[in-house]
Amino acid sequence: MASILITNALTVNEGSSNHQDLLIRSGRIDAIGGDLSGKRADRVVDADGCLLFPGMIDDQVHFREPGLTHKGDIRSESRAAVAGGITSYMEMPNTSPPTTTIDLLEEKHHIARGASFANYSFYLGAANDNIEAVKMLDPKQACGVKVFMGASTGNMLVDNPDTLEQIFTHSPTIVATHCEDSPTIAENTRLFRAIYGENIPIALHPAIRSEAACYMSTALAVDLARRCNTRLHVLHLSTAKELALLSSMPLEAKRISAEVCVHHLRFSETDYRDKGSLIKCNPAIKTEADRRRLLAALQEETIDVVGTDHAPHTLAEKQQSYLSAPSGLPLVQHAFVSLLEHVHDGALTVEQVAQKTAHNPARLFDVKERGYLREGYWADLVIVDLKQPTVVDEQPVHYRCGWTPFAGCTFRSRIAATFVGGHLAYLDGKIDPQPAGIRLEFDR
């Protein structure tokens, strides 16, 4: 593997920003220092005027393989991820078949080997009937156990109270939850069907997948975690009310952590008017007040991680009526620059961005030797130019589904380069054709 010297960068790492060079050898960070021009390297990348971050570790994606590959697959969606500065991802189990056995978990790792442009791990999915698989899981074998405590695809809704308690008691690793209360959602749908029939307006999505549905389910998960001493990670918070269930202690002191996704920080219910079902997702995008409070909770340390919940569907699928259109948005290509808009607006610092997208996911999931700019760690890096815009409509969309909810947007930052394990995976708008992602390892 070629050695690469990155010069003149402003490194963003562990709470500070410094003008430094960084040398990559054998896929790892060999040296970081103020001036490494005396070091020999096969290639020099001048990052003058740019920021150098540890690559984003996305703790929640749906890449649709196996079984749903008309929407996307590991190869197509991981290509888009590296174009967006995401160097590692953790993929969800609601594929076809669902990843609810150890054999199916290993099969997904086999599919990703040699095909993924970013580093990868996969969740074991919990179900009402696979508690023995959860108990048997080697904690180094998966990023975590995923529990859908709300309506989901296939046999993945866990709604049996005894099973939930068993999962929370016996999971050998972190439990990540999708929290929405299905009976509440069903009743809300029934009420609006009585008024609108099959033509429910998309603007009522946050009233159907309501604040009450989210809070009730998150409260149950938090209560279970406290009673069972579970390491719980609540995914994609969407309401201000849920924040009262969480703590603003440092991450190291927490047993219960939380994630917010870039689309819940970007959009609010007023955007349904223009975007329609293109921004239909579960949990729903809610009010502007919720959006602002979620952003504030990132600053206050109540929310620990920013992810994407990347979930592609074809445009034809999304253009169906409200009740038929599937939920989910393709996001990985523009997630990082979308988050940096909050830096431009003064709501976040670049150091907080590094913390929420790289340091904290690495810490939370015990990812081995990634998530920081440290000598000896894998060289998973992203170079960002805060002064060069990204005009979304002028770029190719790398998702298999071919569309983005950010159409029409201009972001004030640009991803200049992405390195995956020292491999220059993306540079100046071009994706290297050779996938370089490897399986994530965990220090557990």
Image (cartoon, rainbow, N blue to C red):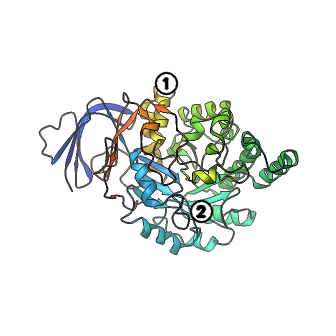
| 137 to 1, vertically: above or below | below
| 194 to 148, vertically: above or below | above
Name the residue type under label 1.
Answer: Gly
Residue 69: tell me if it is visible: yes
Mark 1 residue element: loop
Name the residue type under label 2.
Answer: Asn
> Tag on residue 346?
1
Q: For the N terminus, give its image quadrant.
A: bottom left
In this image, 65 relative to 389: left or right?
A: right
Characterize the local packing of mark 2: few (<14), some (14-19) or many (20 or more) Cα atoms within 10 angstroms.
many
Which quadrant holds residue 125?
A: bottom right
Tally of numbered discs: 2
> Tag on residue 94?
2
Instruction: Name the residue rendered at 76%, 46% in the picture.
Output: 208
Instruction: Name the residue rendered at 52%, 40% in the picture.
Output: 250
| 282 to 157, vertically: above or below | above
Q: Nearer the viewer, residue 336 or 442?
A: 336
Residue 366: tell me if it is visible: no
Residue 135 point in image, percent of width and height? 58, 70
In this image, 376 relative to 321: left or right?
A: left
Characterize the local packing of mark 1: few (<14), some (14-19) or many (20 or more) Cα atoms within 10 angstroms.
few
Residue 82 point in image, percent of width and height? 39, 49
Q: What distance separates the C-alpha of mark 1 from that of mark 2?
A: 37 Å
Q: Nearer the viewer, mark 1 or mark 2?
A: 2
Residue lying furthest top: 346
Q: For the C terminus, give its image quadrant.
A: bottom left
Q: Nearer the viewer, residue 98 or 327?
A: 327
Task: Confirm or deny contact between disc 1 and disc 2 (CB under 8 A).
Answer: no
> Tag on residue 333?
none
Which quadrant holds residue 273?
A: top right
Mark 2 residue element: loop
Residue 379 point in image, percent of width and height? 30, 49
